[in-house]
Image (cartoon, helix red, strand yellow):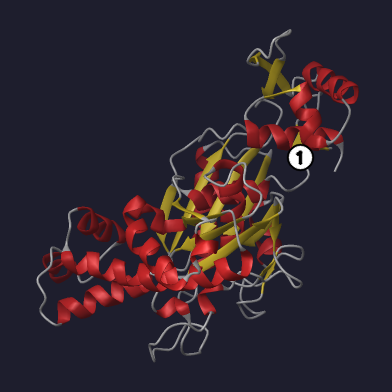
Amino acid sequence: MNLTNEIIKHLYYSDCLSVSELSVCTGKSIPKIADEVATLLRDHLLIEDGFAASTGGRRAMRYSLAVDRLPIIISIAIDQFYTAIGIADIRNTLLAPIHTFPVAIYDDEHAFATIIAAAREAIDRLGNPKHCLLGLTMPGFVDSERGLNHSFPSSSPFFNIKQRVESELGYPTAVANDSSAIAVAEHKFGKGRGSQDILVVNFNWGVGLGMIISNKIYKGHSGYAGEFSHIPLANSQKLCSCGKKGCLEVEASLVSVFDAIKAALADGEASHLQQTFQENGEITFSDLLFAFAHGDQVTLRAVKNIMHMLGKGLSTLIHIMNPERIIVSGKGEGFGNDLLPALNSSIQEYCIPRLSRLTEISVSDLNNVQIIASACIAMQQPILIYPKLKHNKLQQL
């Protein structure tokens, strides 16, 4: 990666930095950074953004990214049942509301076409900009280097996902596993910022895991590390989506929360969700959050039981990894800190105290974290800038 790319990417994650701060981030000398910053200012890629706080001497100027010659970021965040599309400028300002829509990627044969059509519509509404980077995150065994998702057969458009999206939309595209990407987002923008060793639980329809070790995403030998869902800790005889019994996912995911609530309603238990289920034939995630926030006992019990099993799994991770922080992220962050009492109680029960006391457990405060994660993945690509002359060709740094 050349120095211009490095500076742009560090500023993307940090809003504004001084020359000395950029020197620390890049490991390059202050004179070299100062020369490069001067060039970027002259080329209108950076702007002056005020002075840093005084440290006793002359206050340093800080710099941030200019949006005019830098790419728009398109984020496509796919989970098992929903997809969200967000479009933002290089300073993370949304250019349109995030569009979320239902699509079951494992069951709907038209899922890929539906996602592409929605992305095209969102892009068209912005005037079909030519200068974009696209990041796509989704569950599965995603090979980021080759742009493949091995959780799908080779006949599926989701298998060769990078090539298919680039062919359909025409933008440089980076792809990644959703949980690994969410770990990057939490490390760069969330509660993991400033920590070197964090585990990020993607509490979603499944239970994913992203790991930051020594400030770097850890993917293991083959790139598939983090299959936390499939640790065999559950007592249920229910088959997991992987085809095996005993996986953590069957007792510690949002799907298991919904299953427990529906079973309670079928048994005639009183719940605020009974009427909703009878009228609509389903319970949405928003319904679930509302019931939880208003103290519905069936919902509270279901979530508490899931947190107990999740805490059992996290205790295993604490014993193995000894992380500085564990962050519960993903869709489940919508429950907020009310998840922590049951989770901490379970960790206290199953984890060696000397180790558990050294790990901080928290719930993410990032909304739409997978959209942010997809943007982070998009920014891992070489940066494209508008050329100085007004023509259609792009200049790659």
Percent coordinates x, y for residue 212 in the rendering:
65, 56
- Looking at the rendered image, the quarter that the N terminus falls into is top right
Furthest residue toward top: 58
Residue located beneath label 1 in the image: 383
Name the quadrant containing residue 213.
Answer: bottom right
Q: Nearer the viewer, residue 48 or 95?
A: 48
Q: Nearer the viewer, residue 279 or 318?
A: 318
Residue 191 in sight here: yes
What amino acid is at disc 1?
Answer: Ile
Percent coordinates x, y for residue 13 in the rendering:
64, 37
Furthest residue toward front: 354
Left or right of 56? Residue 232 is left
Left or right of 368? Residue 377 is right
Percent coordinates x, y for residue 29 in the rendering:
89, 28
Q: Nearer the viewer, residue 327 or 129?
A: 327
Under circle 1, the secondary element is loop
Percent coordinates x, y for residue 38 in the rendering:
83, 17
Please tell me which residue is depicted at 50% across the width and 39% down the height of the picture. 125
Name the quadrant containing residue 154.
Answer: bottom right
- Looking at the rendered image, the quarter that the C terminus falls into is top right
